[in-house]
Image (cartoon, rainbow, N blue to C red):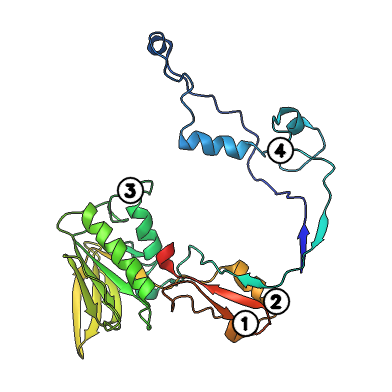
Amino acid sequence: MTEKRGRYILDFIDTPSQRQPMPELEVEKRIDNFEEVELGFTQEQAIAEAKRCLSCRRCLGCALCLAVCEPNAIVFEQEDESIDLIVDEVIIAPEVERYMPVKKGEFGFREHFNVLNAFEFERYLAENGPSGGLILRPFDGEIPANIAFIVDDNKNSNPLISYILKEAALALKKTSDLKISIFVTDQENIKKEIPEGISIRKATITEVKEIEETKNLMVSFNADGENREEEYGMVVIAKKPEISTETKELCNKLDLKSEDTRLPFWDTEQPALIQTSIPNVSLCLSDLTNK
């Protein structure tokens, strides 16, 4: 196996900016104590400072970076190099992208304001998310009275169900009197304890329509052979995340057969190794419950 290492040069679209001033404790507040004078950057200041670090964009050999780099990490003599590695076995540990492959138009996704995918909903639950951990509808910022989760997975894989149940349970803790319905295609494999306020519904979703006046969603589904409709303030779509582009490219470089690159990492409770079409090349399977 050959590993190629090249000098890491990026194109930057930002313009050089001034160094961020370090916030300091006011003089009146530091004369009678030993508190730290330098208060540190806020998150916004830290990001701005990090972005200006390489704002020269391409190396012109001026050596200004070497002059100010205290750890002396700048090596102008560094050259591209190729390293031959001899290994007994290769284990590919595929990661999943933080991307949920919900296409525009699926259940009204990207067509109706209050239809999200599960990763977007996760960001709403995060304390550093767009709403500070509050569950607010994107259209009007109102707190929804009920939420429908649509699990679009024919196999009803346990890791995906577990992930959705965790998100739903966290949503219940953050919003009182919230009602949550999780629509699945099969209930037989669901053995988790269902928290109060969450109902698991075996049904096939046929359509999600937006009510013009309220921007609520009308969910049409078939359950037990009967067509029904229910109104929800928000709809969250959950699908299995995709394998990362890097993993797909690596499998192509190793010339793995297509049936070996499907990577059924949703079907195992614990990480496991499976042999690929190439001797001494294995896949390490994982699932979303560890994310």
Residue 171 point in image, percent of width and height: 26, 58
User: Please, which residue is most extreme toward the bottom here?
Assistant: 225
Residue 276 is tagged as 1
Lower position in the chain sequence, tag 1 or tag 3: 3
Neighbours of disc 4 within 10 Å: few (<14), some (14-19), many (20+): some
Residues marked 4 and 1 touching at CB (< 8 Å)? no
Q: Quadrant of residue 254?
A: bottom right
Lower position in the chain sequence, tag 3 or tag 4: 4
At label 1, the amino acid type is: Thr
Lower position in the chain sequence, tag 3 or tag 2: 3
User: Is residue 143 visible in this depiction of the protein?
Assistant: no
Lower position in the chain sequence, tag 4 or tag 1: 4
Residue 56 is tagged as 4
At label 2, the amino acid type is: Leu
Left or right, 26 with reference to 181:
right
- Residue for point 65% across, 77% down: 281
Above/below status of 77 relative to 114: above
Distance between the Cα atoms at labels 3 and 4? Answer: 35 Å
User: Please, which residue is most extreme toward the left here?
Assistant: 177
| Secondary structure type for disc 2 | loop
| Secondary structure type for disc 1 | loop
Residue 237 point in image, percent of width and height: 35, 70
At label 3, the amino acid type is: Ser
Q: Nearer the viewer, mark 4 or mark 1?
A: 1
Q: Nearer the viewer, mark 3 or mark 2?
A: 2
Distance between the Cα atoms at labels 1 and 2? Answer: 10 Å
Residue 124 point in image, percent of width and height: 34, 54
* Pointer 2 residue: 254
- Residue for point 56% across, 68% down: 244
Residues marked 1 and 2 touching at CB (< 8 Å)? yes
